[in-house]
Amino acid sequence: MGRGAVWRLRSGVGLFLLSWVPFAQLYIWIADLSGESADKARVSIWTVQYLIGFIGLVLAGTAAKVAIRAAGWKHLPITLWRMLWTGQLPGSS
């Protein structure tokens, strides 16, 4: 199990949240794009953000699998919160 589960959970949540930042709109505004060039940039950035979010969900899901094995389904939300907030693994004090 190890501390890797905590790292995967924190990284996964961070990547998922990062995928929701409106980078496409920021880039289009900063680069002053419009029309078809703005559409191409938006789709490209959204594709990358989708992949980043998916990787984040996979990382967080592997950490959740560790937490389920350690604490069970009933205690999963509080166990994941403790792992995320304190960095403590399930069953360690």
Image (cartoon, rainbow, N blue to C red):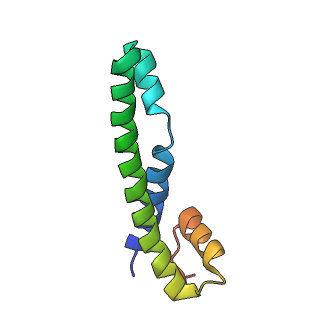
Q: Does residue 44 lie above or below 79 as drawn?
A: above
Q: Quadrant of the N terminus?
A: bottom left
* Relative to 85, 34 lies left or right: left
Please name the residue shown 40% across and 65% down the image: 58
Question: Residue 79 location, x and y as percent?
Answer: 60, 76
Could you tell me how many numbered marks the image carries? Answer: 0
Q: Residue furthest front?
A: 36
Horizontal side of 34 relative to 93 (left or right) equals left
- In the picture, residue 35 is in which quadrant? top left
Q: Residue at x 42, y 20 (%)?
A: 28
Instruction: Identify the image quadrant of residue 6.
Output: bottom left
In the rendered image, the vertical position of residue 51 relative to residue 79, given as above or below: above
| Location of residue 77 in the rendering, given as x and y in whole percent from the top left corner | 64, 73
Q: Nearer the viewer, residue 43 or 11?
A: 43
Closest to the observer: 6 or 93? 6
What's the residue at 40%, 39% (across, down)?
46
Relative to 91, is 32 above or below? above
Q: Is residue 83 visible?
A: yes
State the image coordinates of residue 68 (x, y, percent, origin top left).
53, 83
